[in-house]
Image: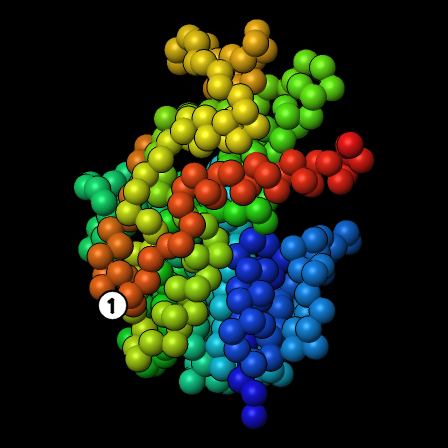
């Protein structure tokens, strides 16, 4: 009998990439959990035609919905990518963030414990759990010091998983996945905001129009960025290990938002210059302001640098990312140029 995998968040970046990976690398039946929306957004999975992939109704804010999915499908794996995953929004909706990211995990664990205790469970963790870091790079022994409701919600989920794993001998884990991006990243995230903005600048300059500036917050914050497609490979490897382990997953390198901008601009053959400082800093090209800074996009509590200590993952899993930071930025910009061209019928 074929094994069954429930993947939540399949219309998002990570979930859709995981479905692609599982369809290619396994013969498992995959059930993509989605919640009912008045206007469905299935762009990231519109290319999937396999009969092994089916969408099911699964609302993480509804305990009955979670229990029913586990009872009806008896999954061998449950991979939870669904979340309120935008750090900035978590300040505006802290209650919703905690309910979606932590309470839902409790309901999933209860469902697995009661109805499919041999199911292997992975919950998406984040480097934002480390928050106000004590040292760099961060390893699995670093204390949890979140700086946002989002980070705090993921810390809560982590400890729930630990309690259920140790109390009921479940194969359940939550790894620290550092920033991972790609062509399917939501437009509300800063990396996609930049790549989409650069694509629009590209076409404005081609048409001889004044380009619209990309408005950002702290461009000097540094992150350990990796490609989302590299991430799903290692998650599946972790899920099929001998025992549940919590790994720190990243590249071991950091890059600033400023550098992301500069590489993205070079992708469209722009080599501008930075002028001014602080809130008055601008990125200028041929007299055009292409990037501006606004206090509006600074967070109440900023995390300045996150960097993964990937020693355990490299040694124990023999894994490393295949896509470099520069390749990641370039492919995101090129993809947004392609999308903008199609949407605006540019020639």
Residue 87 seen:
no
Decide which of 61, 266 is in the foreground and name it.
Answer: 266
Q: Residues within 10 Å of mark 1 (few under 14, many from 20)?
A: few
Q: Secondary structure at mark 1?
A: helix
Question: Which image quarter: residue 113?
Answer: bottom left
Q: Position of residue 129 (x, y in %)?
A: 34, 49
Residue 218 seen:
yes
Instruction: Answer with left or right where residue 341 lies relative to residue 161.
Output: right
Question: Which image quarter: residue 202?
Answer: top right
Q: Position of residue 254 (x, y in %)?
A: 32, 39
Relative height, residue 261 to residue 213 (above, below): below
Relative height, residue 299 to residue 252 (above, below): above
- Please report the residue visible at 77 percent of the width from the left and 52 percent of the height from the top: 39
Decide which of 29, 158 is in the foreground and name it.
Answer: 29
- Please report the residue visible at 23 percent of the width from the left and 45 percent of the height from the top: 137
- Please report the residue visible at 36 percent of the width from the left and 79 percent of the height from the top: 170
Question: Please, which colouring scheme is shown?
Answer: rainbow
Looking at the rendered image, the quarter that the N terminus falls into is bottom right
- Please report the residue visible at 31 percent of the width from the left and 36 percent of the height from the top: 305
Looking at the rendered image, the quarter that the C terminus falls into is top right
Q: Position of residue 197 (x, y in %)?
A: 60, 29
Q: Position of residue 277 (x, y in %)?
A: 39, 11
Q: Which residue is mark 1?
A: 316
Relative height, residue 296 to residue 86 (above, below): above
């Amino acid at each position: 009998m074929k094994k069954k995998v429930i993947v939540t968040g399949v219309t998002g970046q990570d979930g859709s990439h995981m479905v692609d990976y599982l369809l290619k690398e396994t013969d498992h039946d995959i059930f993509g959990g989605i919640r009912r929306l008045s206007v469905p957004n299935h762009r990231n999975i519109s290319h999937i035609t396999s009969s092994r992939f089916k969408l099911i109704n699964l609302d993480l804010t509804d305990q009955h919905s979670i229990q029913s999915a586990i009872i009806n499908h008896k999954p061998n794996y449950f991979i939870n990518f669904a979340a309120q995953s935008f750090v900035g929004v978590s300040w505006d909706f802290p209650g919703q963030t905690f309910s979606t990211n932590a309470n839902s995990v409790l309901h999933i664990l209860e469902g697995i414990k009661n109805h499919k205790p041999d199911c292997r469970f992975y919950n998406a963790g984040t480097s934002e759990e480390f928050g106000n870091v004590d040292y760099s790079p961060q390893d699995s022994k670093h204390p949890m010091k979140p700086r946002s409701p989002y980070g705090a919600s993921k810390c809560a989920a982590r400890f729930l998983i630990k309690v259920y794993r140790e109390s009921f001998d479940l194969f359940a884990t939550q790894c620290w996945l550092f920033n991972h991006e790609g062509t399917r990243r939501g437009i509300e995230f800063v990396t996609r905001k930049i790549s989409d903005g650069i694509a629009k600048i590209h076409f404005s300059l081609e048409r001889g129009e004044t380009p619209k500036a990309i408005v950002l917050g702290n461009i000097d914050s540094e992150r350990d960025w990796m490609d989302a497609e590299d991430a799903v490979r290692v998650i599946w490897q972790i899920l099929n290990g001998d025992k549940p382990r919590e790994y720190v997953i990243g590249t071991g390198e950091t890059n600033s938002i400023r550098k992301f901008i500069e590489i993205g601009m070079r992708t469209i053959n722009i080599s501008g210059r930075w002028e001014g400082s602080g809130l008055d800093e601008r990125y200028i090209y041929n007299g055009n302001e292409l990037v501006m800074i606004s206090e509006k996009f600074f967070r109440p509590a900023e995390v300045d640098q996150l960097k993964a200590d990937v020693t355990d993952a490299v040694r124990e899993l023999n894994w490393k990312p295949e896509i470099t930071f520069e390749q990641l930025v370039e492919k995101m910009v090129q993809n947004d140029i392609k999308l903008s061209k199609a949407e605006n019928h540019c020639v």
